[in-house]
Amino acid sequence: MKRNIFLIAVLFSTIAALSTTLAHCDSMEGPVVKASQKALETGNINYVLVWVRAEDEQEINTMFDEVNKVRILGPEAKELTDMYFFETVVRVHRMGEGVGYTGLKPAGYKPEEGIEAADIAIEENSLDPVYAHFDEAQNPEIKEYFTDLQSKKDYDVNDLKAGREYVEAYVHFIHYVEALFQGGDIQFEEHEHHSH
């Protein structure tokens, strides 16, 4: 009986771990929604297109046009259509990464510790928040991935190729750090997100 309870506990913890993978990208404060907000504010869809695959561009472009026609009808219409747009972009983004969409996490949602540390490192342009948890000498890849990410961040918003290269570097760095925090198989994590 105890063995069965243990196996059930392991199964549930595995499911929970899988459901939180890439959860950062599906929160209202995550980079995909922020890019979507920027696109709606500026009228430039390219802020969003870098977060989806080239083959998904048409769907997002069509949605963007439809949303812009409706959101001008009033505050309520704007709120509803904006949320619909955010959800669509996040769903398509996650689908492109081979991950299911389970809805948007609300504002104030706190991501996993590893993702949070990686995000702060990017924001502060310093690896100190990550190195506070890991030995730099034992994890030289952290600096390698971070340097690659930083070298790509100042891309022209209208250069989708450069933007997608930045997003790929971003995803790679974030989830490499996340895997370190979880003590997981780094090679698996790298392989899983390499094709972003």
Image: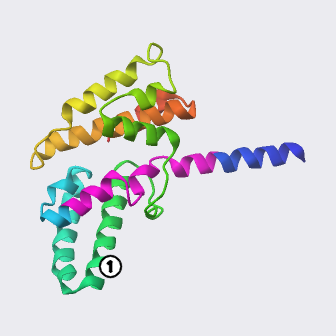
Q: Quadrant of residue 49?
A: bottom left
Taking the magenta stretch, the answer to whether it contains residue 47 is no
The x, y position of residue 118, in whole percent, is 40, 37
Residue 14 vs residue 28: left or right? right
Q: Quadrant of residue 35?
A: bottom left
Residue 170 vs residue 184: left or right? left
Taking the magenta stretch, the answer to whether it contains residue 25 is yes
Instruction: Look at 53% across and 33% down and name the residue there.
Output: 181
Q: What's the residue type where badge 1 is placed?
A: Leu
Q: Secondary structure at mark 1?
A: helix
Quadrant location of the C terminus? top left
Instruction: Look at 26% across and 27% down and name the residue there.
Output: 148
- The one nearer the camera, 25 or 127, is 127
Magenta stretch?
A: 14-38
The x, y position of residue 41, in whole percent, is 17, 65
Classify 10 Å Cα crowding around label 1: few (below 14), some (14-19), many (20 and above).
Answer: few
The x, y position of residue 131, in whole percent, is 45, 25
Q: Does the image show residue 62? A: yes
- Of all residues, the one furthest to the bottom in this rendering is 73
On screen, 76 above or below 180?
below
Q: Does the image show residue 58? A: no
On screen, 193 above or below 139?
below
Instruction: Look at 33% across and 29% down and name the residue there.
Output: 126
- The one nearer the camera, 144 or 189, is 144
Q: Main secondary structure of the magenta part?
A: helix
Residue receiving disc 1 = 80
The x, y position of residue 46, in whole percent, is 15, 55
Instruction: Look at 15% across and 72% down and name the residue there.
Output: 65
On screen, 162 above or below 134?
below
